[in-house]
Image (cartoon, grey):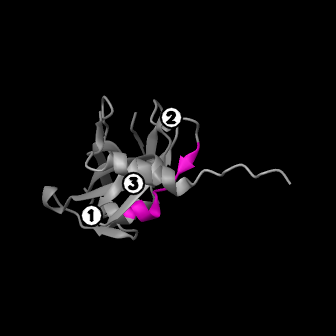
Amino acid sequence: SPPRPEEEDPNARLTERAARGAGHAPKTLPLPPDNPTAWAGTVALKVVKLSTAAHVGSGRVQLVTDESFLLVTLLAQNVGKQPAEVDPTTAQLVLPSGARAAPAPDAQRLVGTVPGVRTLQPGGEEVREEWVLAFEVPEAALAPGLALALGEARIPLR
């Protein structure tokens, strides 16, 4: 029988990328030009930071991707008169093609926003919460038309 072609080891590619990315900070992306506040019921949502990274985590626990992690930092504040419930990890990234992507579960844990419903109390700035959402996407998806959907809120990102 003919010799089998050598198969590329996917872990070797990721190891090389992790070594190249060690010590490199995430790349900050510009916020959308008008950066509107979006609403999920009485919860106001505002994008305060967008960045990409080849890896998330620190120290001994890191995840590396062949694509990119898009990190979306949101501020959430309940402006209603009653408590409101929201699970930030149910957000979906709406790609320019119309496809949707859920947060990357393992990366999500490493950026500190664990899955689960948050009960936001009504109030002013002192009861704001900051959430970081991590999505694993190809670089080509970071194009005009990219948006974040959370509940009935749709937030343009690019």
Tag 2's secondary structure?
A: helix
Residue in the foreground of this view, choosing between 56 and 151: 56
Give the left or right position of residue 73, taking residue 107 as reference. Answer: left
For disc 2, the marked residue is 140
Residue 119 in which image quadrant: bottom left
In the rendered image, is residue 40 in sight?
no
Q: State the residue at coordinates (72%, 49%).
A: 5
> Upstream in the sequence, badge 3 or badge 1?
1
For disc 3, the marked residue is 134
The range drawn in magenta is 99-108
Instruction: Say above or below: 110 vs 140.
Output: below
For disc 1, the marked residue is 59
How far across and how far down the image is residue 28, in percent? Answer: 28, 39
Residue in the foreground of this view, choosing between 56 and 8: 8
Give the left or right position of residue 11, taking residue 22 as reference. Answer: right
Residue 60: say if magenta: no
Q: State the residue at coordinates (65%, 52%).
A: 7
Give the left or right position of residue 49, taking residue 6 as reference. Answer: left
Q: The residue under label 2 is which amino acid type? A: Ala
Tag 3's secondary structure?
A: strand
Residue 30 in which image quadrant: top left
| In contact (CB < 8 Å): disc 2 and disc 1 | no
Q: CA distance from mark 3 to mark 2?
A: 17 Å
Q: State the residue at coordinates (20%, 58%).
A: 128
Q: The residue under label 3 is which amino acid type? A: Ala
Tag 1's secondary structure?
A: loop
How far across and how far down the image is residue 43, in percent? Answer: 32, 56
How far across and how far down the image is residue 40, in percent? Answer: 39, 54
